[in-house]
Amino acid sequence: MTTTTLAPSSTAPTTTLTLSSVVSGSTPELEGYDEEQVRLMEERCILVNEKDEAYGEDSKKTCHLMTNINAGLLHRAFSVFLFRPSDGRLLLQKRADEKITFPGMWTNTCCSHPLSIRAELVEEGQKGVRAAAIRKLPHELGIPASQLKSDDFTFLTRIHYLAPSDGLWGEHEIDYILFCTLDVDLDINPNEVSDARYVSKAELEAMFVDDSNSFTPWFRLIARDLLFPWWDEMLAKSEAEGKGVVRAVYDRLSPLGSQILPPKTADITSPDLGPLESALEGASAVVSLAGVLVGSKKKMVEVQQEGAERVARTAKKVGAGRLVLVSAIGADKGGVTAYWRTKAAAEETFLQTDPTATIIRPSIIFGPGDSFFTRFATLAKWLPFLPVFGGGITRFQPVYAGDVARAVEICCRDDPEVVKQVGGKIVEAGGPDGELQTHFRSVRNSLGLTILDPQVSGVADEPAQSSPTGRRLILSLPFWLGTTQAFFLEKLPETIFTLTRDQVTQLRSDNIVSPVPPLNALSFDKLLAAFPSSLPSSQPGNAGLTSVHKVLPRYLGPAKGVEQGKRTHGRGSAVDQLGDVQRTTRRAEEMKGKGQ
């Protein structure tokens, strides 16, 4: 058996397989098999090339004959891994003896193929394979379709594998891996499944070493490279957040490319560069993401300026080919805040160290667990008003975390054509929603789609107006008052209520893509359009920037189905954050009473 992962591609293949090269028609291969399974072999699978580009269809029988597989015939498939929420156990199935390929073997919850029908041919957002999963889970395991939704499935990656079942049949698939955590009812179809059981990680490991059990080859492959690392992440909630998150990121990405190195800890503020050199050794690309939103000027110099300098110089020393710095819109050596000045100093160091380095300056980044929209949403739930400074006319251009990640990935490529276009460039990353005003328009129009709907949570349509219906008051405060508040609040432990004088100062300036870009600027949307990702839905010429209106309802909407991020401002639940607000308010009042 051979395995490989999909490589990014933005061009169509120059050659395709033709159906004249495969064996089909009425042949005796299916004689003696179960009648229902023979009927299912006439289903039409989606033919793809090695870049997962669909080009035709053929019968399930044709796709699984080793004669055709050896000739290069390849089709699309999916594998579902369903976990029980209460204890994290995985649902396994044992394939029925009636199955034509890999009968009587244990495997993941459900594995099958999207068919060449309209609903299952849709590639955008993996909608086709999700629809296929919703079709097959009821068929094989009797799970009611009412218990399944497309958004229940998390797409991890695709694998390309070839495995013979016997001398006649086999598999050659590009397999979409879907994970989900659901409580479901089972009524197994004995023609498809002979047994089903929930297992813990330890129990599955014991099953693997028991010679009396046999497993499908794709399940063994996925368990080794994807399943066990993901399971570790789920069970590691008791670990420190930083370690757990870093390890989880690596575990999810490591199967996608051997160049992704395991996580190591290094203090970028330390003069001892040994640990940093060890961490970066062998890296072909280094991305610096370190930043401080709340901290003293000294801390920002140590982390954002001197720390970034150590990263850049060490990366160059160990031979990293590509350097990328994630900075911020507003970075300026003559900026009025330490945050902007140290970001600009880091940019200068990166470009001096490596003239082909790339700087990415995002506006406010949003996504599950962000510290901006999530923060205001929580405040709106618990406070009688929403504060804005200076009339709330400051503009910003929120950009989705996934879109910034796409840009980072592109800039890390060592493709000479990519380096030619991104080397030495500054990319100002703004979202597609134009220039949103920070509070009046943004809070009403963006958050208003979710928990801040005026009819639900009561966001006032106009500032400084109360309402007998309990609507939230949007209260405009002068900058001088915000500065005074920040003087006290920045001295307290960081919570959802934290505000610094530098943050108030920065609110005086717009946070949008420069109307007159610098000479070495590169357009964010043009970059993403020129170099799309390897996903089938990424088409050349389409940047595909994500709107706040599309994503915010997913994680700031009603509690059911809301996505949860790894980080929340204040590092607690909404109830914890309300407590933070109350405690901070009391301490500020105490300090004021003492004349501090």
Image (cartoon, grey):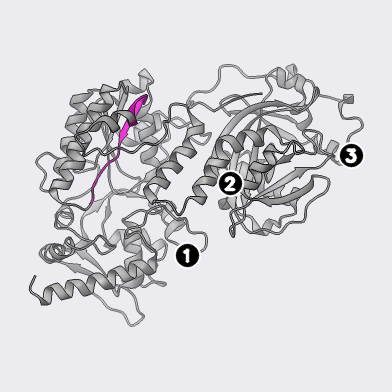
Q: Is residue 239 above or below residue 481?
A: above
Q: Residue furthest bottom?
A: 468
Q: Position of residue 91 (x, y in %)?
A: 67, 50
Q: Is residue 118 left or right of residue 298?
A: right
> Do we see residue 331 in this rendering?
no
Of the two numbered discs 2 and 1 on the same chain, state the one appearing first in sequence. 2
Q: Which residues are magenta?
A: 279-293
Residue linked to disc 1: 558
Residue 36: give x, y in percent of width and height. Answer: 86, 41
Say if residue 577 shows up in the picture.
yes
**Residue at image mark 2:** 179
Mark earlier in primary sequence (2, 3): 3
Identify which residue is drawn at 14% across, 55% down. 505
Q: Quadrant of residue 523?
A: top left
How many angstroms separate mark 1 from mark 3 (CA)?
48 Å
Residue hosting label 3: 35
Crowd class of label 3 (few under 14; some 14 to 19; many from 20; radius 10 Å): few
Say the numbered circle drawn on residue 235.
none
Q: Residue at x 77, y 56 (%)?
A: 187
Please identify the quarter of the rendering in which residue 127 is found.
top right
Percent x, y of residue 274: 27, 30
Q: CA distance from mark 2 to mark 3?
A: 32 Å
Q: Please rate how many residues cluster around mark 1, counting C-alpha atoms within 10 Å: few if below 14, some from 14 to 19, many from 20.
A: few
State whether the magenta stretch is mostly helix, strand or loop.
loop
| Callout 2 secondary element | strand
Tag 2: amino acid? Phe
- Asked if residue 507 is positioned above or below residue 468 in the image, the reply reads above
Q: Looking at numbered disc 3 in the image, what kind of residue is underneath it? A: Glu
570 versus 51 height, above or below: below
Is 447 part of what is drawn in magenta?
A: no
- C-alpha span from label 2 to label 1: 23 Å
- Does dot 1 land on a helix, a strand or a loop? loop
